[in-house]
């Protein structure tokens, strides 16, 4: 590997957390893909290359297609993914990290509850929940938008779809965050223990909830998945893995893009004013929030045969890192990409992925955001950033503010 092809940036650095986009621009300026030694991975930073990888059926998420069980075990040990019995069963295997028949079969069992038509039926319930939450906060002159408001919505809504009691939803967020944190670059033994312990607790909770639903089914996703398991359409491990994935996916990324989306409006006050004046722009503004600060900026793929990308041939088994956060700021695809445009159209971003792994919950996430921001602007005549600059989370796989202190004035 030549020295020129080795990425020198540190995704765990405060500089990258503060503003990763100059680093992404540097990657896009380099010819072809760039090798990142820390992950033994080829990074795709341009929109064209990212799209070609995620749309290629020869690109997969799971190593099972390219390596023997012994080789996979060695790779897991090298990456400190081993000796995690529950994490291995329910997190390292999932709908997200499966391919082909298994992926299609599992996705089919839950897809019907996440269609635009089904999600639209939730609007009144989400609106009522958001309104009550804001009612409880409105008398306070300042709040942490992330912790006090954003963090309470996505998990509660997805929890209700699955059949989780409202009072249990805050705990689900804690489990989810402690499990997901192990997917970033820092995989220390302490973070590993935290992920495994929380996966175990999450599993035991879902076991209890499942037993309750088996005795008394309800009109929820948990009961529907139990029926799928009884029909032989998923096994027990797939049941728990899918339930965990749905709940975890319903938390972090939407919370993150809510915070970064509001921060973007503070950075571009003319766009906030434009959105306040014309709520019909909300749908395009929400899409722009996902493009402008993609909450899940990094995913991986493996090639199942030799492939050619950007003029170079990569052998079977090569690992690729698709940088959605970089692709969504590519000037070759988006005019003036570093400007937030509430009315940007077309806006064919890749924040939800593409192809077989296109985000199942994208309609629900966008509806949550539409309702939250529409309600905020209707209820408060002024919303201002109460700190000089919010701090963003560190890591390659996540993009979101740690907190967002705001001051607001009710109408």
Image (cartoon, rainbow, N blue to C red):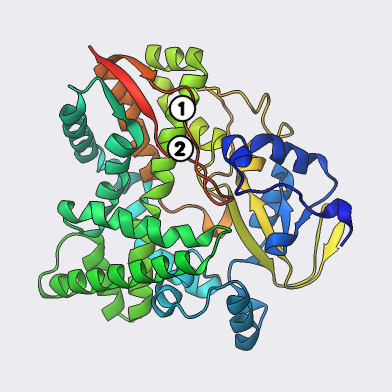
- Quadrant of the image containing the C terminus: top left
Identify the residue at the far bottom of this view. 70
According to the picture, the residue beneath numbered tag 1 turns out to be 263
Check whether the beta carbons of the residues at disc 1 and disc 2 lie within 8 A of each other.
Answer: yes
Q: Is residue 214 above or below residue 148?
A: below
Residue name at image x 58 percent, y 76 percent? 76
Classify mark 1: residues with Cα within 10 Å, few (<14), some (14-19) or many (20+): many
For residue 138, side relative to residue 187 (left or right): left
- Whole-percent x and y of residue 264? 49, 26
- Dividing the picture into quadrants, the one containing residue 127 is top left
Label whose residue precedes the other's in the sequence (1 or 2): 1
- Quadrant of the image containing the N terminus: bottom right
Identify the residue at the far left of this view. 216
Residue name at image x 20 percent, y 34 percent? 133
- Dividing the picture into quadrants, the one containing residue 211 is bottom left
Residue name at image x 38 percent, y 17 percent? 384
- Whole-percent x and y of residue 266? 46, 20
According to the picture, the residue beneath numbered tag 2 turns out to be 401
Distance from disc 1 to disc 2, alpha carbons, whole Å, reads 9 Å
- Whole-percent x and y of residue 66? 67, 78
- Mark 1, secondary structure of its residue: helix
Q: In this view, does 269 lie above or below 92?
A: above
Q: Which of 205 and 77 is in front in this view?
A: 77
Give the mark count. 2
Residue 95 visible at all: no
Classify mark 2: residues with Cα within 10 Å, few (<14), some (14-19) or many (20+): many
For residue 17, side relative to residue 236 (left or right): right
- Mark 2, secondary structure of its residue: loop
């Amino acid at each position: 590997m030549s020295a020129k092809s080795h990425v020198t940036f540190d995704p765990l650095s405060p500089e990258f957390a503060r503003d990763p986009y100059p680093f992404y621009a540097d990657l896009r300026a380099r010819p072809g893909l760039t090798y990142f030694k820390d992950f033994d991975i080829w990074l795709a930073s341009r929109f064209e290359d990212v799209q070609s990888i995620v749309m290629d059926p020869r690109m997969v998420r799971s190593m099972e297609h390219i390596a023997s069980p012994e080789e996979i075990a060695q790779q897991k040990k090298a990456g400190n993914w081993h000796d995690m019995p529950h994490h291995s069963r329910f997190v390292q295997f999932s709908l997200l990290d499966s391919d082909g028949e298994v992926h299609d079969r599992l996705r089919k069992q839950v897809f019907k509850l996440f269609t635009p038509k089904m999600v639209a039926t939730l609007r009144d319930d989400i609106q009522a929940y958001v309104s009550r939450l804001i009612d409880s906060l409105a008398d306070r002159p300042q709040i942490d938008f992330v912790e006090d408001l954003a963090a309470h919505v996505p998990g509660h809504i997805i929890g209700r779809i699955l059949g989780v009691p409202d009072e249990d939803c805050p705990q689900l967020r804690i489990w989810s965050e402690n499990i997901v944190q192990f997917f970033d670059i820092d995989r220390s033994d302490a973070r590993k223990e935290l992920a495994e312990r929380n996966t175990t607790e999450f599993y035991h909770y879902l076991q209890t909830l499942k037993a309750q639903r088996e005795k008394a089914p309800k009109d929820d996703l948990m009961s529907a998945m139990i029926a799928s398991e009884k029909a032989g359409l998923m096994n027990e491990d797939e049941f728990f893995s899918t339930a965990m994935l749905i709940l975890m996916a319903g938390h972090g990324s939407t919370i993150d893009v809510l915070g970064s989306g509001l921060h973007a409006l503070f950075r571009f006050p003319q766009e906030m004013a434009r959105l306040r004046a014309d709520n019909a722009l909300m749908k395009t503004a929400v899409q722009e929030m996902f493009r402008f600060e993609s909450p899940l900026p990094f995913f991986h793929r493996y090639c199942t045969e030799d492939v050619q990308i950007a003029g170079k041939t990569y052998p079977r088994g090569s690992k690729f890192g698709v940088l959605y956060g970089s692709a969504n700021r590519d000037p070759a695809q988006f005019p003036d990409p570093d400007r937030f445009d509430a009315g940007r159209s077309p806006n064919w971003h890749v924040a939800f992925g593409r192809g077989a792994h296109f985000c199942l919950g994208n309609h629900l996430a966008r509806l949550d955001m539409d309702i939250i921001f529409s309600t905020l602007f209707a209820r408060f005549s002024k919303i201002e950033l109460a700190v000089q600059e919010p701090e963003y989370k560190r890591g390659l796989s996540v993009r979101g503010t740690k907190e967002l202190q705001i001051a607001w004035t009710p109408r």
